[in-house]
Image: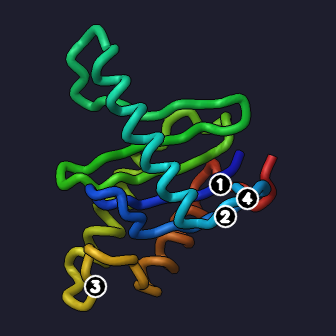
Amino acid sequence: MTVHNLYIFDRNGNCLYYNEWNRKKQAGISKEEEFKLMYGMLFSIRSFVSKMSPLDMKEGFLSFQTSKYRLHYYETPSGLKFVLNTDLSVTNARDTLQHIYSNLYVELIVKNPVCTSTQTLESELFSSRLDAFIRALPYYSPRAA
């Protein structure tokens, strides 16, 4: 079990934060291109799910999986998007993403007058607390499966 990486996007598709823990394969493109592709994929999947769902979905798109990883998605009412990629053994990381938002992002970024949430997050405190939180998760393993 492991965590591969985390993206935080604003409502306009700008990547505010990115970190990786156990990512074995790189995309072979620049990080900026990777961020654009990830946001574009999320936008497309959300649109597809909302149009194709037979029921009115309150929570919308939560996750999807491939044969190699699972992507977990959480969107806040303000339009922030949190994306966590894990291995397939992690079935639900919604509580983890909500915790990152409410207990780390809101407390260390939103309530911090020095940080502006309209640019790349460069808070050492946020990064170190997030890293400690991810490493303490029951499904985190320093060795990728």
Would residue 67 be found to the left or right of residue 131 on screen? right
* Image location of residue 45, percent across then percent down: 42, 32
Residue nearest the viewer, comparing 25 with 136: 25
Q: Which mark is residue 4?
A: 1
Disc 2: CA contacts within 10 A as few (<14), some (14-19) or many (>=20): some
Amino acid at dot 1: His
Question: Is the residue under label 1 in contact with that under label 2 (CB below 8 Å)?
Answer: yes
* Image location of residue 74, percent across then percent down: 36, 45
Disc 4: CA contacts within 10 A as few (<14), some (14-19) or many (>=20): few
Question: Is the residue under label 1 in contact with that under label 4 (CB below 8 Å)?
Answer: no
Would residue 100 be found to the left or right of residue 88 on screen? left
Disc 1: CA contacts within 10 A as few (<14), some (14-19) or many (>=20): many
Disc 3: CA contacts within 10 A as few (<14), some (14-19) or many (>=20): some
**Element class at badge 4:** loop
Name the residue tied to disc 4. 28
2 or 3: tag closer to the N-terminus: 2
Amino acid at dot 3: Cys
Name the residue tied to disc 2. 21
- The CA span between labels 3 and 1 is 26 Å
3 or 1: tag closer to the N-terminus: 1
Name the residue tied to disc 3. 115
Question: Is the residue under label 4 in contact with that under label 3 (CB below 8 Å)?
Answer: no
- The CA span between labels 3 and 4 is 31 Å
- The CA span between labels 4 and 1 is 16 Å
2 or 1: tag closer to the N-terminus: 1
